[in-house]
Amino acid sequence: MSLCLEVTFTPAEFAAFGRRELGQTVAVVFDVLRATTTMLAALAAGADRIIPVAEIAEALARRRADPRVLLAGERDGLRIGADLTGGVEFDLGNSPREFVPDRVRGRTIVMTTTNGTRALRACAGALRVLVGGFVNLGSLARLIERHRPARLLLVCSGTLEQAALEDTLAAGALADTVWPLYADGQVADSAQMARQLYRQLARDLPAAMRLSRNGRRLLDRPELRDDVAFCLQRDVTPVVGEMQRDGVVRPAAVAA
């Protein structure tokens, strides 16, 4: 069977996944700035599990069912506050720098963000759903090279309803790394586009973030500016998150 490699760029595309047959597809979800990077930081810091939910109301319902869970997430880039919940302050925002062992070790985190958690939930019908970023790119590539999925779908979470440069670059970086596996198969033009864009901008990713809508927004906020550099670190964690059939993200087994 010929191997297939595809990239999707916008929420409109992952919103349509319910009409696609994904049973033989391994999906890798990227929300580099910042949801998937933050999930990986939390797992690397010892969080027991992460439950991604699409809406604030669902996160609050999870807290009512289990008061021990930590609530994390953002709207418009900022931690969800009492004004959006009817009085409940979320414990954490969406900055990966917040998710340190003293805060999250052994804890269950219920997380909702504008795009990233929505993208993960949209991929629920896939054979496997992996959580990706620059921070774990090498581990992702090793996992893919080990298992050689017949269909590899790299999902960019985007910004609001638009494409996001940083997600496209991360998808392109992974496509470039596993290219030898897929080059003779069915490679979608979208994968070619992401790979070529990454190759053009890879030498100076911090400069590329100044072209990114999300990058500029974070860089303009002194309290969030350092998140950008954090999220661009490459291969600083061996952790690959995997959303399992129960909708919970836990660390996946990765070959050494």
Image (cartoon, rainbow, N blue to C red):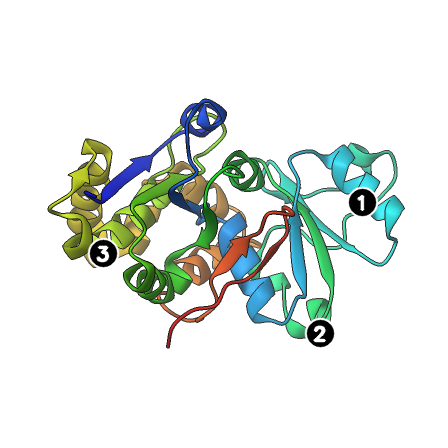
Dot 3 or dot 2: first in sequence order is 2
Dot 2 or dot 1: first in sequence order is 1
Counting other residues with Cα less than 10 Å from the Cα at mark 3, is it few (<14), some (14-19), or many (20 or more)? some
Structural distance between the alpha carbons of marks 1 and 3: 38 Å
The residue that label 3 is drawn on is: 178
Residue at (32%, 45%) from the top-left corner? 152
Which quarter of the picture shows residue 117?
A: top right
Relative image position of residue 209 (x, y in whole percent): 35, 47
The kind of residue tagged 1 is Arg
The residue that label 1 is drawn on is: 62
Element under label 2? helix
Element under label 1? helix
Structural distance between the alpha carbons of marks 2 and 1: 22 Å
Dot 1 or dot 3: first in sequence order is 1
The kind of residue tagged 2 is Asp
Q: Is residue 256 above or below residue 191?
A: below
Q: Residue furthest front?
A: 1
**Quarter of the image containing the C terminus?**
bottom left
Using the image as rendered, state which of residue 234 and residue 188 is in the foreground: 188
**Is 229 displayed left or right of 185 in the figure?**
right
Counting other residues with Cα less than 10 Å from the Cα at mark 2, is it few (<14), some (14-19), or many (20 or more)? few
The residue that label 2 is drawn on is: 102
Counting other residues with Cα less than 10 Å from the Cα at mark 1, is it few (<14), some (14-19), or many (20 or more)? some
Structural distance between the alpha carbons of marks 3 and 2: 36 Å
Q: Is residue 9 above or below residue 179?
A: above
The reply to whether discs 3 and 2 touch (Cβ–Cβ < 8 Å) is: no
**Is 19 displayed left or right of 7 in the figure?**
right
Residue at (46%, 25%) from the top-left corner? 161
Element under label 3? helix
Which quarter of the picture shows residue 166?
A: top left
The reply to whether discs 1 and 3 touch (Cβ–Cβ < 8 Å) is: no
